[in-house]
Image: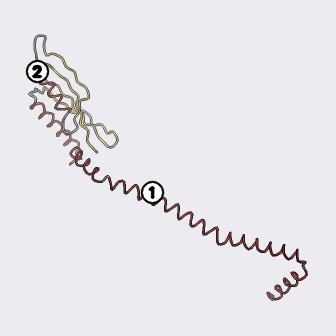
């Protein structure tokens, strides 16, 4: 059957004129070229294109990682610098509040400030950190109060003053009554 089809094709081509044969050969060549493009060349180029895209993505990742590796020493130094703020976090909120109260009491004793009372407030979660609030009332000379406030603000454990109120204890007294809201930022 195949042989008869081939013979029929040769017989058909044999009956064509030279001009018709040239058009037939050009048509066969164009069809073959199109088939070659669709079956072999296009898949190869699309595969090469996707591989090139993947290579560019991997190169970008490698460059990013190289930048991070180049900054490794700086990152480790920053971590050591600020690690004390996050080191050994206590998961127990009562322990954290007790720690804050002890620290405030230590700073007050160091500044010779008399603490009338200290009341822990509510701890507030804010993202990846938690603020522990302590309200306190104290009495001392103005210089001692200023020293106490300075000690709180410059504490190495992220203590900060939210608000404060100063008032003289009496009209003729040099002693100042102070109400302060102190909070500490801790990680969760």
**Left of 113 or right of it: where is 17?**
right
Mark 2 highlights which residue?
141
Mark 1 highlights which residue?
60
Task: Identify the secondary structure beneath mark 1.
Answer: helix
Relative to 184, residue 83 above or below: below
Q: Is residue 90 visible?
A: no
Callout in the foreground (2, 1): 1
Q: Number of labelled discs?
A: 2
Number of the label disc, if any, that sits on residue 143: none
The residue depicted at 76 percent of the width and 74 percent of the height is: 29
Relative depth, front residue between 92 and 90: 90
Q: Is residue 110 visible?
A: yes
Q: Quadrant of residue 99?
A: top left
Relative to 126, residue 52 above or below: below
Q: Position of residue 107 (x, y in %)?
A: 13, 33
Q: Quadrant of the C terminus?
A: top left
How dense is the environment of label 1, judged by Cα within 10 Å: few (below 14), some, or many (20 and up)? few
The residue depicted at 12 percent of the width and 27 percent of the height is: 115
Relative depth, front residue between 47 and 134: 47
The residue depicted at 15 percent of the width and 15 percent of the height is: 168
């Amino acid at each position: 059957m195949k042989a008869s089809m081939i013979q029929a094709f040769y017989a058909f081509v044999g009956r064509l004129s030279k001009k018709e044969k040239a058009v037939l050969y050009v048509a066969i060549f164009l069809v073959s070229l199109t088939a070659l493009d669709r079956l072999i060349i296009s898949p190869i180029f699309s595969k090469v294109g996707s591989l090139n895209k993947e290579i560019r993505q991997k190169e970008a990742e490698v460059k990013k990682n190289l930048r991070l590796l180049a900054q490794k020493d700086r990152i480790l130094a920053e971590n050591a610098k600020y690690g004390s703020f996050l080191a050994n976090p206590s998961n127990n909120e009562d322990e954290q509040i007790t720690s804050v109260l002890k620290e405030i009491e230590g700073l007050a004793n160091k500044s010779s400030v008399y603490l009338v009372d200290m009341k822990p407030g509510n701890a507030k979660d804010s993202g990846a950190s938690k603020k522990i609030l302590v309200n306190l009332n104290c009495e001392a000379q103005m210089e001692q109060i200023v020293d106490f406030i300075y000690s709180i603000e410059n504490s190495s454990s992220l203590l900060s003053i939210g608000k404060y109120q100063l008032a003289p204890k009496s009209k003729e007294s040099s002693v100042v009554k102070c109400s302060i809201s102190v909070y500490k930022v801790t990680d969760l």
